[in-house]
Amino acid sequence: MQRGHLGLLAVVSLLVLSGCALPDSPDRFDTDRELGYVGGYAHDDAFEFDDADALTERQLEAVKYRSMARIEVVRGLQFEHDVRLEVISRDEYRSQRGAPRSASPFVNEVWRGAFIVDGETDVSRAMNTLYGGAVQGYYTNDRIVIITDDTNEIRINRNTLVHELVHALQDQQFGLDRSGQSIDEQRAEIGLTEGEANYIPYLYDQRCGEEWQCLAEYERPPATNLGETPFNAGLFLSIYAPYSEGPPFVDHLRDRGGWAAVDDAYDDRPASTSQLIHPEKYPDDRPVDVEVPDRSSDDWEPFTRGSEPRTETVGEATLFAALWTNDVVDRWLTDGATELSPYNYSYPATDGWTGDTVQVYHDADDEDRTGHVWKLAWESDDDAAEFADAYRALLENRGATAVEGTDDVYRIEDGEAFAGAYRVTVDGDLVELVGAPTVDDLEAIHGSGTASATLERPVTAPATATNVSGSIVAARP
């Protein structure tokens, strides 16, 4: 199905600045002050200048402090101290990132198995291309960095600045540490922070006009067909899920219990992208842990972390991205979108997801020759059958043909992007997918049997600390 032409826009907008940085202020703000007064500026200040002409550094500083004051009014929380603001060129940003290390065979197989990154492409390089071209800015350790393609003048789009300042406020009030280990857990946790950082600019904009004098939005770049962009559309949709599904999730929390409910969510963050897409599932409907028994022959071995098999959980949002990028989703990406969410990640074939586990195997004599077992749990037998049908449609769209004399085994010819053999097994509310280089390897990686698997509540993953939040672009029609 032709899903239409999608254009790029800066959802968290673009700040263009001539390679400069505002002066650092080590002073902490007075916490006894009234909300909405920061750095000598008030939330209802009106400036004589606008962004029709380039701003001076002092004018930009005034805009920063007024924006911080307004965020305090909208959110009902105070900034504790100042935030450094600097801007770098996109070339400098790419230089700082440096050349990416090659992804591991495990990681490459996970994304190949999801039919998002083909077997001839290194995932790390695909990620680097995406971030190098799509990131508009980021916040880390009391420092906001805006990335721009034009360094001739200082011009500002308020949504970019507000978005990153919200991250600074989150860091000061709640911390930005994350504990998620899997693809799905990471997307879910980021959905809260990025969701709020996109939601507050929306509320901010509602006050512009009659209540607040606001700078006009900086003109966005012209629309570009998503298919013509240099980055991988499936990866983009997976990574962008928190930015799209996060704002309505935060709005749902606020409707249910005010800002206090959003505050509480920082102590009990969403556990899956399913909870972002279907916020009524938060916090009680947590994903199940799907165990994959090892039924491999001596010729194949699972990748391990320590003494245990290494596994991954893809999650509902990335499943949707896989189906969409492989022409299975039979609607426009923006059908059902709202003011808060530019894309609609809900789809019948993925809505019933309750958990999944990918286990990757390698040839005992060649670690780069890989295959996988992917088990997915669903809310009902019907949900499992519907997803299995969608996966078969994906295989067909990729040129797979059924292997004669087998039960639900398919093969994509050598030379194609996702060449290999694939087996689909449905057992009640479970779907088992096995991928291998050849048909014979399917049995060697995972001997035939039912898709039965043990379902348990997940164990909390060990915490890892990070406090970086970034801004990326979205595509629209």
Image (cartoon, rainbow, N blue to C red):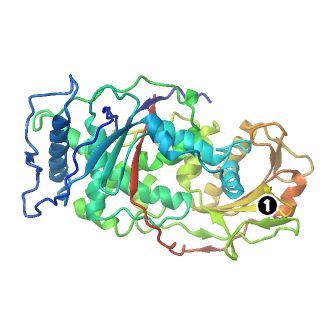
Relative image position of residue 302 (x, y in whole percent) = 76, 67
Q: Which residue is mark 1?
A: 362
Farthest-out residue, right: 405
* Residue 176, picture quadrant: bottom left
- Mark 1: which amino acid? His
Residue at screen point 28% across, 54% down: 168
Closer to the camera in the image, 464 or 301: 464
In the picture provided, is 4 more to the left or to the right than 73? right
In the picture provided, is 92 more to the left or to the right than 164? right
Camera sees residue 248: no
User: What number of labels is visible?
Assistant: 1
Residue at screen point 20% across, 39% down: 206
Relative image position of residue 466 (x, y in whole percent) = 42, 62
Q: Few, some or many C-alpha atoms within 10 Å of disc 1 (few <14, some 14-19, many ≥20)?
A: many
Relative image position of residue 1 (x, y in whole percent) = 62, 30
Residue at screen point 38% across, 69% down: 268
Closer to the camera in the image, 71 or 384: 71
Q: Is residue 81 above or below residue 410?
A: below
Relative image position of residue 11 (x, y in whole percent) = 37, 38
Residue at screen point 92% across, 50% down: 405
In the picture provided, is 27 more to the left or to the right than 136? left
Mark 1 element type: strand
Q: Is residue 277 above or below residue 63?
A: below
Closer to the camera in the image, 190 or 146: 146
Camera sees residue 33: yes
